[in-house]
Amino acid sequence: MKRTTATLFACSTFAIAATAHARGLQARTEVTPADGYEAVPAVLFVPDAPISLIPSSMCPISQGGNDNAGLGCVAGLDAATDYMPPANLVNVVEGLSSALAPYNVLVTSVRPPEYVPYQMLLPSDEVNAESLSRTCAGAAIDCDGVQRNDIAFTSGGSMFCMDPDPVQAALIAFGYMSGLENNDNPMDPMFYQADAPFGPDFTMPALTYADTCSNLVQTVDDMEMINPLQCAASINHEPYCDGMDNQANSHQELLAYYGPGPVVEDTTPPTVEALGIMDMDGAVIPDGGALPLTATVSDDSGPVFVRWTLTSDNADFLTFDADGNGSVCKSHNGVCEVDFMGEVPYQQIEGNNYDATEIAMVPGDDYTITFEASDLYGNTIEAVTVTITVEGGGGGESGGADTSGGGSASASDTNASASASDSNGDESTSSDIEGPGDSGQTDDSGGGCSCNSPGAGGSAWFLLGFVGLAAGRRRSRR
């Protein structure tokens, strides 16, 4: 079922299959790491004011048909729209904050910079009678919580979801974004009834993720046909239950992905230890020289996020301006023509050296360069801006460089979270959603790849900077 503007805040269908008796385990003394990385904090942004949303297919920087919270790009949305917060938003935020207090997750209504990855939840109290959702919660399931810029939704009701508890629906949606799947434990928000009426039991809301191993439960579509689990149980769920078959522990999984809470308040921006453009305003670089786009940045809370932006009116340079904003940039979070590619989940670089050599070789002209940096919690440095002239072009002393060949560069952030209605997250990307790039989220095959690369051809001075980018960023996909 294609997600339209009318059904955006509803959700679609899902349910479960057979279930066995749950087996409880004592709380662990050690946290089991996620598949491929140690626990890393996250930010959950819940807007308290209207925000603009656009279809992922219209995203200024291609997302491969997937969500990007920073840019407000929504997979499957058919037209631009504005999200309006519900009247019960305060209660939802308070409920989320309480339920997520055991984990290193900041729940906030202050939006971080777009180049900082953050999860976004858009609650709604509107009832959509046409929606087929059984959970009133929609998000793509991100196995192991690798992607940290997903968008999730809740609704006030659907054809198969009557009078949902708004907090539990929000916890289901957050669970999907974190790689959780449904289970048979009525005391856990991810509970899903295996028999009609299928779905959560909102008459007895569960508002705390249970530290108990429970049986994983498959869901059903609107025809009550069984949908498969989206993550490999033996990799993504069973390690948190001592390897027991078909078992999952919501609490232990969240600890593995985010670490133990509560969140420690952080108001300190990153420290710029070295910056190549510092004191370079007005500098002139010889023809063929590289812009000094080097930076070493660290932060006391861990992850660092940066954005380099080059602005020029040089026509050859602007060939690579994918979003047509008059500049070319490199950043985190898939919001630029070039992405950082490092360690998951936040593409962090060993040694904290966040250079932009891919865009440092430019044709002769004048360039305004801006460097920004932020920590995960949105504490930013004062942006550094300089203008540097590269000789050999319109702004230099010797004519323009030979940059024939054309071509363009664009970032394609393939969101490989598993997807489906409800249990995948209803009304998120599914095999029924049409549009370019959507196929990247519709199957259960292993390993999606997100690649940043220029188009065919391209100017030699710039194309060399993109060599090696085709390896892309890999997202957990099972």
Image: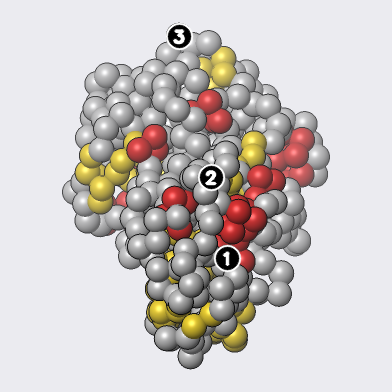
Find residue 48 and report its horizontal and vertical position in percent.
25, 57
Residue under numbered circle 2? 405
Identified by mark 2, the residue type is Gly
Q: Nearer the viewer, residue 401 or 221?
A: 401
Residue under numbered circle 1? 361
- Looking at the image, residue 323 sits to the left or right of residue 35; the answer is left
Residue under numbered circle 3? 223
Q: Which residue is depicted at the point 71% across and 56% down?
A: 37
In this view, the residue farthest toward the right is 243
Secondary structure at badge 3 equals loop
Quadrant of the rendered structure where residue 79 is?
A: top left
The disc, 3 or 2, on the residue closer to the chain's N-terminal end is 3
Q: Residues within 10 Å of mark 3 (few under 14, many from 20)?
A: few
C-alpha span from label 2 to label 1: 16 Å
Find residue 101 and report its horizontal and vertical position in percent.
49, 62
C-alpha span from label 1 to label 3: 57 Å
